[in-house]
Image (tube, helix red, strand yellow):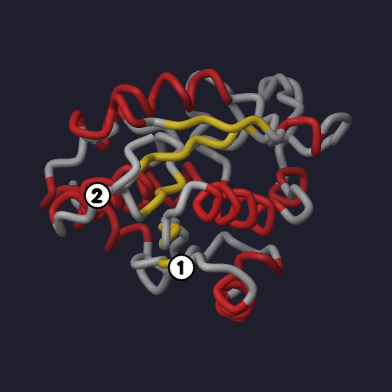
Amino acid sequence: MRNNVKSILLASGGLDSTTLAYWLRQKKIEFTPLFIDYGQHCVATERKTLNVVVPKSEFRTIETINIGEVYKGSHSLLIREVDLWKHRARAEDLYLPYRNLLLLSAGAAFAQSRGASYLYAAFINSNHAKELDCSTKFFDELSKVLSEYGSVTIRMPFRKLSKRQVTNIGLKLGVPIASTFSCQAASTVPCGACPNCVDRLEALRAFG
């Protein structure tokens, strides 16, 4: 990791975090992409996708940390992939306890241990985000705690934006949206039915 970089970006190869990477580059904010392996079944696809979609100027700086043991044994469909031809994937089956808390805490710890002052995350205002740790109140309070008891400030530029608005930003910035991967239920080919896929498809349809 470059010593002079003061920002870390949680990057997954998805539409939102990839758009944020291009947004940061446009703002001339230097950053290191951080990929977190938390045991998700699509980890190989996400990591491969990130290598393809991240701005070329940041490709060689991608960092990866593995915290997959935390969810070992979990029955969440984010961790345990099922055959979608035989099983119905309900939104509640995708719930993973404290996932966002874990990602932000790990990201902030990584940032502070390397002297970075800011942690960027591409969480958006999703109609399909029902979990407690997706609420505005949660993010605001967690950001306050992490800044007061550490040296890292969490920044979420897209927090109040919809998927459609983020997609519009991505199109204007030349983000390779078609190459991003955001599916929750399938590890290789997007299922088209999970909350992430629904948000993505609705946004893309809005732009033809």
Q: Position of residue 17 (x, y in %)?
A: 38, 47
Asked if residue 144 is positioned above or below residue 108 in the image, the reply reads below
Residue 70, quarter of picture: top right
Residue at x 75%, y 21% (from the top left corner): 86
Q: Position of residue 7 (x, y in %)?
A: 36, 54
Chain-order first, disc 1 or disc 2: 2
Q: Position of residue 187 (x, y in %)?
A: 57, 22
Left or right, 188 with reference to 54: right
Residue at x 11%, y 52% (from the top left corner): 172
Asked whether the beta carbons under mark 1 and mark 2 sit within 8 Å of each other, the answer is no
- Considering the image in quadrants, where does the N terminus appear? top left
- Name the kind of residue labelled 1 in the image: Asn
Left or right, 167 with reference to 66: left
Label 2, residues with CA under 10 Å away: few <14, some 14-19, many ≥20: some
The residue beneath circle 2 is 30
The residue beneath circle 1 is 125
Q: Position of residue 33 (x, y in %)?
A: 39, 40
- Name the kind of residue labelled 2 in the image: Glu
Badge 2 element: loop
